[in-house]
Amino acid sequence: LEARTTDEFRAVTTALARAPRPLTLVFERRVDDDDEDSPPDVPSAVGSVAGEHERRAKSLQEEPRGPPPSDEPVRVNATMAEPPAAGLVAAAGRVWVDAAGVGALQAFDEVVALDGEDLGSLGGAEGLEKAARRLGGGPFPFEVGLLRRPSVFSVDFGEEKPLGLLLRLATNASGRRAVVVERVRGDGPAASLAPRDDELVAVAGNPLPRDCGPDDFEETLEHLKRRPLRLTIWRSSLGGGDPLERDVVGRAVLGRPPSAAAAAAAPADEAPPLVE
């Protein structure tokens, strides 16, 4: 509904009066944090409502609009004191963090540097092997450079039971079945989530299936019983691509004993990660 002028306002009210019942109305509530104690301005007559609406619409049109939301990755530097309980994947010629349920690493982070050395020129497979050996075998401590998208973030839960959020299985804008946040309750960590805009993309660092069916959904709900728990969220309104829409061509699991063949091929003082 748009009512930028008095005539448009009258057209809207007429449409509302004629709409069949029952009728559902959806509202947007705008709160000014700097003026919470001021009394609400509630005009008592329809004419004054129309005039106020027209005045506010005109002022909004005159205000300069800010830039559209950006999902430009942000550089994050993390110090690794020991091998992380995480994994890495190679996709789209780059190296990404996978299965990171705690600590400084987050699922879907892109690994771009190891102790200041850029990985960009190595490509997916070679970069994956180098990053896996350094993250899995040290020497420690060292600094890892990451690129993190603002639209992909994590929410950590301690012993909160319940979590305070309602999830549902739905088809997202990419056309795949996804787990979306339907509602949040209480003032716990889940209060920062945006219902119907946020999508659950990883639980304890483990990415959800690209197409999440009913069985996958039930399994995801079982994993939500863990504590502590990290949920990784994608906020689609910030733009950027769907983080689950990627073709993984290689995988490295850190913090897991390597196979005998891999151990025999590695130097004695270096414990290589399992690479698939």
Image (cartoon, grey):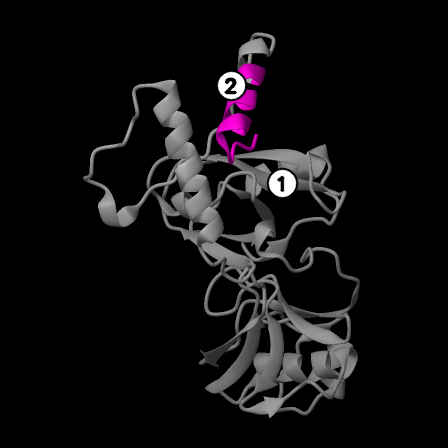
Image coordinates for residue 262, horizontal then vertical, percent: 75, 80
What distance separates the C-alpha of mark 1 from that of mark 2? 37 Å
- For the C terminus, give its image quadrant: bottom right
Is residue 202 visible to the viewer in this orientation of the structure? no
Q: Which residue position is annotated with label 2?
A: 13
Residue 243 disc label: none
Front residue of 261 and 90: 90
Is residue 192 visible to the viewer in this orientation of the structure? yes
Q: Say which label, 1 or 2, has the lower sequence index.
A: 2
Instruction: Residue type at mark 1: give it.
Output: Val
Crowding at mark 1 (Cα within 10 Å: few <14, some 14-19, many 20+): many
Query: Main SS of the magenta segment?
Result: helix
**Residue drawn at (55%, 23%), measured in percent from left and top?**
12
**Residue drawn at (53%, 11%), measured in percent from left and top?**
17
Q: Which residues are magenta?
A: 1-15
Q: Which residue position is annotated with label 1?
A: 179
| Residue mark closest to the camera, 1 vs 2 | 2
Image coordinates for residue 4, horizontal then vertical, percent: 51, 36
57 inside magenta stretch = no
Q: Residue 130 falls in which quadrant of the image? A: bottom right
Front residue of 17 and 247: 17
Left or right relative to 26: residue 252: right
**Residue drawn at (55%, 59%), measured in percent from left and top?**
69
Left or right relative to 82: residue 109: right
- For the N terminus, give its image quadrant: top right
